[in-house]
Image (cartoon, rainbow, N blue to C red):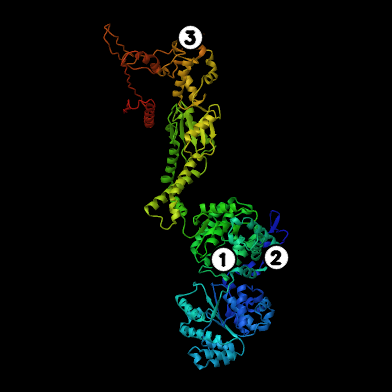
Amino acid sequence: MKVNRERWKIVTETRGVMMEAWYKIVTPRKEVREGRSFNPDEFAIALEQVVAGTAPEDYRDPVQFFARTCWTRALREHVRMVLRRLAGRTDDTAPVLTLITQFGGGKTHTLTTLYHLARSGPKAGEYSGVADLLQASELACVPEARVAVFVGNAWDPQEGRETPWIDIARQLAGDLGVQALGSAALDAPPGTEALARVFQAANAPVLILFDEVLNFVNRHRQFAEPFHAFIQNLTVAMTGTTCGAAVISLPRSQVEMTDWDLQWQERITKVVRRVARDLIANDEAEISEVVRRRLFEDLGDERMRRRVAKAFADWCFERRAQLPPEWTAVDAAATESRARTLLQQRFESSYPFHPATLSVFQRKWQALVQYQQTRGTLAMLAQWIAWAYRDGFTQARREPLLTLGSAPLHDPAFRSTILGQLGDARLLAAIETDVAGEHSHARALDAGTSGVLRDIHRRVGATILFESSGGQTDRVAHLPELRFALGEPGVDTTSIDNAAIALEERAYFIRRVGSDGFKIGYQPTLRKVVNDRRASLDEETEIKPSMRKLVESEFRRGAQIPIVPFPKDGSDIPDNPKLTLVLIDPEIEWSADPSFRQQLADWTRQRGKSPRLYPAALIWCVKKPGRDLQEKVELMLAWERVAAEVAEGVLGSDFDPRERAEISTKVKQATEAAKDEVWGGYRFIVIYEPGGASDGLKVIDLGAGHSSSGETLCGRIIATLKTEGLLSETVGAGYIERHWPPTLKEAGAWPLASFRQSFLNGSLTRLLDPDETLRSRIVDFVSRGEFGFAQGAKPDGTYERIWFQEVVPVEEIAFDSESFLLTKAKAQRLKEGEAGPPQPPMPLRPPTPEPPLGPSVTVQAPAPEARKRTIRLVGVIPPEVWNRLGTRLVPKLRSGTDLKLGIDLSVTVGGDIEASFVQELGQILGELEIGDKLRIERED
């Protein structure tokens, strides 16, 4: 890929340090760039192909092979001992060596190295790295030897090599070697003397390399016992020579073993280890150099690598108290400066990888039975680099290092490779759902991230996967490990912590472990179960009724005014002078749409088909737009259902005890969250304001609210209306004087019917309970001489009864047209006998025809005797005088004793409104506190 480096110069600048993106410094090998190195077998050497000359040139040609070989400490040590043995040195070596490694751990590479060296002899000194090896081995040159190779998974009997020992003898000494075995070799394994004759016939140092011996024993079970005897005799015979060595590779992992393999591995190991020396073929500390040499053809400018390494090392060292101690610890033998330098060297040696990216495979993955330590890691990283290299250019990414978080888990092929190495395909759902899927929780959380925190939740999720999926006992990704693996200059550790916590709170397969741990697994968390239960909820029979129940209960808690929940139309709302809160159904959201406002306006002014007398008494409360309340209620119901299933024993056995213990807390939290959403969701109130908008409505946004034990929703609404000057607890004399109608100022008398209506139609301030408040205030005003009170207006401007600076019985105050509030001046004049300006003549009402049932009123006058008589008033009263009964007739009757008042009222209404009409009659009787004294009867 040819790229203009100036055009694509992607750098990160932190505290003055310029760090170029990793893909602009290094150059992967061509096969990696082109995506041709994704199969682990491409990184595996087939030793039999090397011997046959059919292996790829990188393995077949010794020059190219050693050019790509990383001389790790372990490899140097293995080769040194073998070469010394071939050179006749017996100190610090052994005649038989066993290579015991993880599957894919570099055994065959070690055997191939020995093969090329022994075959090349002194010429091998020209190969890369061999000169230093000879110096460390105290040898002048590589001793040339006769080499025999036995690869168990490739060997089959054929003419001339009917048995493994005949084949080995022919490779070492040709026909002379076979003759040295004797004719019995066709039927039985050779003894130690026969093998010693073979070594003599070779007439040179001998090296025998064994690979895949267990595969051979499993495939050719008829040879198992003879082969076991052959190996036993070979180890003894090799001990008798000073210029020979045998190297046998045995796998440490049991993943590739059958029961037969296990049995024979144990038997062969016991035989070999009597004289053999065990070697671990892979050097875990130097795996980064192996990886870099195999995957990159150029590591780029050394100064740029050091600059990046120093920036990261400084960042880590400054935060060493928050990171794993094994990376930044300063012991007594090292100064702080030395420790900082060592940390920088670790970053340099692993570049372009972050040290945690490579070390995780040694720290945590090597115990996995399926993990192929060398070839598996190389194939996985090759696939990783190929994707990241292309994505770096196309997306102009800025990462200075390849961190665990950059793993392309969204790519199906790479994901398949990871799951193959982990040996657990069940993790696929966890990766898709929580980390890398198109609709994963991490992707949703990353929607608003940018800059150095771009994709931080996906990076955290990927790191948790790598750090907690290994085969070690502590399968946990701890916060210090996450900080070290993802931290970089410009990123604070708190951001990584917050991302991990946020992802765990949303995830279905990621769990908290202890105070700082996280792990991912195939077993879903209770949160996943809750989500499944939530998905199964029925909206009509469960969700919506629960929403209404919750909303109503929250508003009724400590309510100071009547509540009318979720009316279907205006006729469901009583026409009551007392302030009333009307809750709109949670399905209906506040909208500025004129049609919605018009519906509220119509319901405010009309009750069904009749105009409302008290429109200003209504307070509408409407939910804000959005599904927040429904989602919170769904979550509450789901947690309640899970809690019930756990209590019944249906759930619980498959979940972590800590999760089960937290269920009650989760139920409580979900319930509180739903209540909070009622407070925050029902934030719009609408009231009647005739002088305001064209539709007569005023909208008030309450703002965000939170459930509080010391406050109620009704109290919050009332407090807001008071703050806005739209509601008062009471009224003062000054307020009434300022709002006295101009047309009534000269007369100085305000009919109480009109006075009361001004507080009910929005002309004057709202009162919680207008009738009760106004009655009590009028009593106070009159007794203090601030206003007067009169009843029964006369044509000459006077009144039948006047109260001023005296106590008015509260029952005398009726809000009708025959009762008046008088100004102080007017009351004083009337009390002093001054009529003042004449009142406009009272309109004369036409005479009411006498009802056909008899006289309107029949009075039985008392007899002149002194004894007491009972007087009854019987008849039909015309409607126009109903309002005056309480002010004129009842006070007169109360001058007697044993007054009893009964009623017999009847009215005819349409059948369509009968039910609501009767309901409202019952409500009115209840408000008058006489509901238990009257009964409502129906007649057809």
* Figure check: 550 above or below 351: above
Q: Quadrant of the N terminus?
A: bottom right
Q: Quadrant of residue 11?
A: bottom right
Query: Disc 2 marks which amino acid?
Result: Gly
At mark 3, the secondary structure is helix
* Residue at 71% from the left image edge and 54% from the top image edge: 16
Q: Earlier in the sequence, mark 2 or mark 3?
A: 2
Q: Earlier in the sequence, mark 1 or mark 2?
A: 2
* Circle 1 crowding by C-alpha within 10 Å: few under 14, some 14–19, many from 20: many
Label of residue 830 in the image: 3
> Are circles 2 and 3 on residues that touch, CB within 8 Å?
no
Query: How many numbered circles does the render carry?
Result: 3
Q: Nearer the viewer, residue 306 or 93?
A: 93
Q: Quadrant of residue 775?
A: top left
Rendering coords of residue 118 (x, y %)? 63, 83
Q: Earlier in the sequence, mark 1 or mark 3?
A: 1
* Figure check: 548 above or below 767: below
Q: Nearer the viewer, residue 97 or 794?
A: 97
Residue 719 visible (yes or no): yes
Q: As drawn, is 747 to the left or to the right of 491? A: left
Rendering coords of residue 233 (x, y %)? 51, 86
Question: Viewer-nearest of labels 1 and 2?
Answer: 1
Question: Viewer-nearest of labels 2 and 3?
Answer: 2
Give the CA separation, mark 2 to mark 3: 109 Å
| Residue for badge 1 | 361
Rendering coords of residue 929 (x, y %)? 37, 26
* Circle 3 crowding by C-alpha within 10 Å: few under 14, some 14–19, many from 20: many
At mark 2, the secondary structure is loop
Query: Disc 1 marks which amino acid?
Result: Phe
| Residue for badge 2 | 300
